[in-house]
Image (cartoon, rainbow, N blue to C red):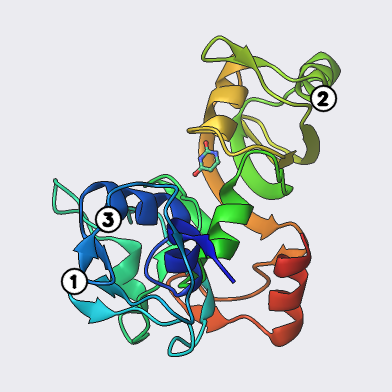
Amino acid sequence: MEERLQKFLAEAGVASRRKAEELIAAGKIKVNGKVVTELGTKVDPKKDEVLYLDKEVSKKEVDLVYIMLHKPEGYVTTAKEQFGRPGVMDLVSQIEARIFPVGRLDYDTSGLLLLTNDGELTYKLTHPKHDVDKTYIAKLYGTPDDMDLQKFRRGVFIDGRQTKPAKMQILERGERQSTVEIVIHEGRNRQVRKMCEAIKHPVAQLKRVATGELKLGDLPKGKYRHLTPKEVKYLKSL
Ligand code: URA
């Protein structure tokens, strides 16, 4: 059966779907001996020969790998970094498959980060229309009051656009800082930090503890584990 070239590449574990589109546009993919730069190109995986860096791409050869990493603060989520800061890929270097992060966490955020070579799943999980809940524990300056919690529930304006409703629950009140649980549905740039700034309680520390029903649990900082088959099934069902 024919399918779009970028989808085929993503399912074969070459890259995420967006990255696959970039590879096509950059002329890095050959179909039946010819460079193809047209994004809508259809291929039949049974009949057509697809090459990336002159190596054949085949769906059968890749084992799909699904990893949960406890990202420490002080690591970037991008693959290459211009300032020479350490990256999350350094923490999963024993994994031989060409995995990549699903979405990202800020340099100074810790917590649950998924990595996989399943480009299709990455595409689904990071697409704005599949707003999977993301749960964070944050230390904030000051303690938000009921009005602040209400603002959060309604959504606040960041970068000129209102966020979808979010939840905030106070877990601990301190003199200078409080600990809260925050659940958001989108994945906008530095969203939690900006939302907390908007209610005048900036973030001092931020950790993602769950993506949907997947929980970080007691996975130590800097360590990773493979997802269980049940967890993978759950992600695919989203
Ligand atoms: N929101 C943020 O502000 N930072 C993250 O890393 C994730 C969500």
Real-space CA distance between mark 3 and mark 1, rounded to the nearest whole angstrom: 13 Å
Q: Residue at x 74, y 20 (%)?
A: 155
Answer whether labels 2 and 1 touch (C-beta < 8 Å). no
Q: Residue at x 20, y 53 (%)?
A: 27
Relative to 227, is 21 on the left or the right? left
In whole angstroms, how far apart are the C-alphas of marks 3 and 2? 47 Å
Mark 2 nearby-residue class (10 Å; few <14, some 14–19, many ≥20): some
Q: Nearer the viewer, residue 33 or 203?
A: 33
- Is 88 placed above or below 168 here? below
Secondary structure at numbered mark 2: helix
Type of the residue with mark 1 = Leu
Does 160 appear above or below 4?
A: above
Where does residue 69 sit, x and y in percent of width and height?
50, 70
**Local secondary structure at mark 3:** loop
Task: Work out how far the residue at label 2 is from the one at label 1, CA to CA, in angstroms.
Answer: 48 Å
The mark lying in front, picked from 3 and 1, is 3
Residue 131, position as x, y percentages in the image: 71, 43
Q: Nearer the viewer, mark 3 or mark 2?
A: 3
Q: Nearer the viewer, residue 7 or 143?
A: 7
Residue identifier under label 1: 53
Whichever of callouts 3 and 2 sits on the residue coming sooner in the sequence is 3
Disc 2 marks which residue?
153
Residue 59 in view, yes or no: yes
Mark with earlier residue (2, 1): 1
Tell me if residue 77 can be seen.
no
Q: Position of residue 4 (x, y in %)?
A: 50, 57
The residue mark sitting in front, 2 or 1, is 1
Which residue, given by chain and number where applicable, does mark 3 sit on? 36
